[in-house]
């Protein structure tokens, strides 16, 4: 099969690695990709938000399947555009991707379908925002309604922080994405994520993971896209997985179908495990980053077959198998991330890290300099993943890989998956 993979981050490197391993893949084209993906396919310089360019590329290579990694092209309707060209896409339609594209849509959907979630208030003006913030005693979460590259959420301990965040968003910090807000009650408990495949009619569990969002050790410092992750999620046991499939994923697959917007693709359910049971923090309409980098190395079923079962609505008789071992990924980021950082520092010895058994180094923000050196150009630059018989061993192996990499411009957390 001719497969086109869209995206350029660590998540897409992990996807490229899995897709290239499939006996069904005869030709993998990646747009735009990154240097780490070069061994798996041909890279084409078409940006992930250039829908016209991506559709033209899919037609040019006679794509049998297009795998859409990031959320922006999904929310912008790439899967719909491909469907109108008769090309199968792994990823939901724009209407179904509203579960990530609009926080207000997601909250209202959960309310309509009795999915457990915190109390929330949609607002579009500052005075109403202040009323709800005061009503919640300032202990609340402020979310920009639309996509904001993972930056549109502020978790506030007091009314002043919450009101400042609401004002900045309403004043245009995230453009149109912040013109509407959702103000939520804060809930507490450990966080975990569950990934499921949905084919419009049925859903099957993929795997669980837990990421670490703060930049520095001991969960200090600013929020990031994720500095590392472990799979399976240590706190999400089989009983809780079943409960989430029943109380969250089931209502999503049935509710989206009943509302005329069937969901086909991977659903990322961000959860808080409260004392009253799991509650939905957020939905994402794609694999997580860095969660994909810990989940996919555990997958023992062919990924292309799973994606085809999703696009062909045949998940009800599809079975996924997983390596029972744990996986840990440690993100290596540019010094300064998630703030500003220098570009161009040289990275060496990735091969040495991959001599650690079951260790893979996934690239995110890398590029090749004119002289052929691998250099850091993004915020999150590498994700070093390793498997182990238990979480402790996986963690030890992942850090064994990290310490072999020679990169003066980077930093990483030293407490990923530490118990
Ligand atoms: N790791 C969080 C995300 O992918 O949204």
Image (cartoon, grey):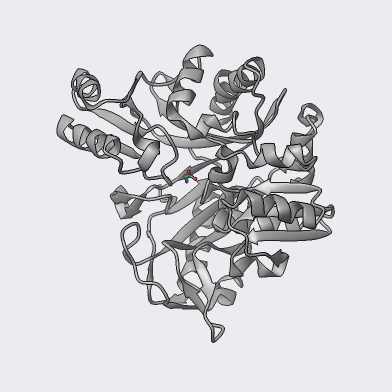
Where's residue 402, x and y in %? 48, 67
Looking at the image, which residue sits at the far left?
160
The answer to whether 28 is drawn above or below residue 158 in the figure is: below
Where's residue 64, x and y in %? 81, 48
Question: Quadrant of the rendered structure where residue 200 is?
Answer: top right
The answer to whether 196 is drawn above or below residue 106 in the figure is: below
- Horizontal side of 42 relative to 95 (left or right) equals right
Q: Nearer the viewer, residue 171 or 189?
A: 171
The answer to whether 83 is drawn above or below residue 22 in the figure is: above
Residue in view at x 48 percent, y 25 percent: 106
Q: Nearer the viewer, residue 238 or 148?
A: 148
The answer to whether 281 is drawn above or below residue 65 in the figure is: above
Residue in view at x 25 percent, y 33 percent: 166
Question: Quadrant of the rendered structure where residue 75 is?
Answer: top right
Where's residue 273, x and y in %? 43, 28
Residue 300 seen in the current view = no
Residue in view at x 74 percent, y 35 percent: 310
Where's residue 244, x and y in %? 55, 24
């Amino acid at each position: 099969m001719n497969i086109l993979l869209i995206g350029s981050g660590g998540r897409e490197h992990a996807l490229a690695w899995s897709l290239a391993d499939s006996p069904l893949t005869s030709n993998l084209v990646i747009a735009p990709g990154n240097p780490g993906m070069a061994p798996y396919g041909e890279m084409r310089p078409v940006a992930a938000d250039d829908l016209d360019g991506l559709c033209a590329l899919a037609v040019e290579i006679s794509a049998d399947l297009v795998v859409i990694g990031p959320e922006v092209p999904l929310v912008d309707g790439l899967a719909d555009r491909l469907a109108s060209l008769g090309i199968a896409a792994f990823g939901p339609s724009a209407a179904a991707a509203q579960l990530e594209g609009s926080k207000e849509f997601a909250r209202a959907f959960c309310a309509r379908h009795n999915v457990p979630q915190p109390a929330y208030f949609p607002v579009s003006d500052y005075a109403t925002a202040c009323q709800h913030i005061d009503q919640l005693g300032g202990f609340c979460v402020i979310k920009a309604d639309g996509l904001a590259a993972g930056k549109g959420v502020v978790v506030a301990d007091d009314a002043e922080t919450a009101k400042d965040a609401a004002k900045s968003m309403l004043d245009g910090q995230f453009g149109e994405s912040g013109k509407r807000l959702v103000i939520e009650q804060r809930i507490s408990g450990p966080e975990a994520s569950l990934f499921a495949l949905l084919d419009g009619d049925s859903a099957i569990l993929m795997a669980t993971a837990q990421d670490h969002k703060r930049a520095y050790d001991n969960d200090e410092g600013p929020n990031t896209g994720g500095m590392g992750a472990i799979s399976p999620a240590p706190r999400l046991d089989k009983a809780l997985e079943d409960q989430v499939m029943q109380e969250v994923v089931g209502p999503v697959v049935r509710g989206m179908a009943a509302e005329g917007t069937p969901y086909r693709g991977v659903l990322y359910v961000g959860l808080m495990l409260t004392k009253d049971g799991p509650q939905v923090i957020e939905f994402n309409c794609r694999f997580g980053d860095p969660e994909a980098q810990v989940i996919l190395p555990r997958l023992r079923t062919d990924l292309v077959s799973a994606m085809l079962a999703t696009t062909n609505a045949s998940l009800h008789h599809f079975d996924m198998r997983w390596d029972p071992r744990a996986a840990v990924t440690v993100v290596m980021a540019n010094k300064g991330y998630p703030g500003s950082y220098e570009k161009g520092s040289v990275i060496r010895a990735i091969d040495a890290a991959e001599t650690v058994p079951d260790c893979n180094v996934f690239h995110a923000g890398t590029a090749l300099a004119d002289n052929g050196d691998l250099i850091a150009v993004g915020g999150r630059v590498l994700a070093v993943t390793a498997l182990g018989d238990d979480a402790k061993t996986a963690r030890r192996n992942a850090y064994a890989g990290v310490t072999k990499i020679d990169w003066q411009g980077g930093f990483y957390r030293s407490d990923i998956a530490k118990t």
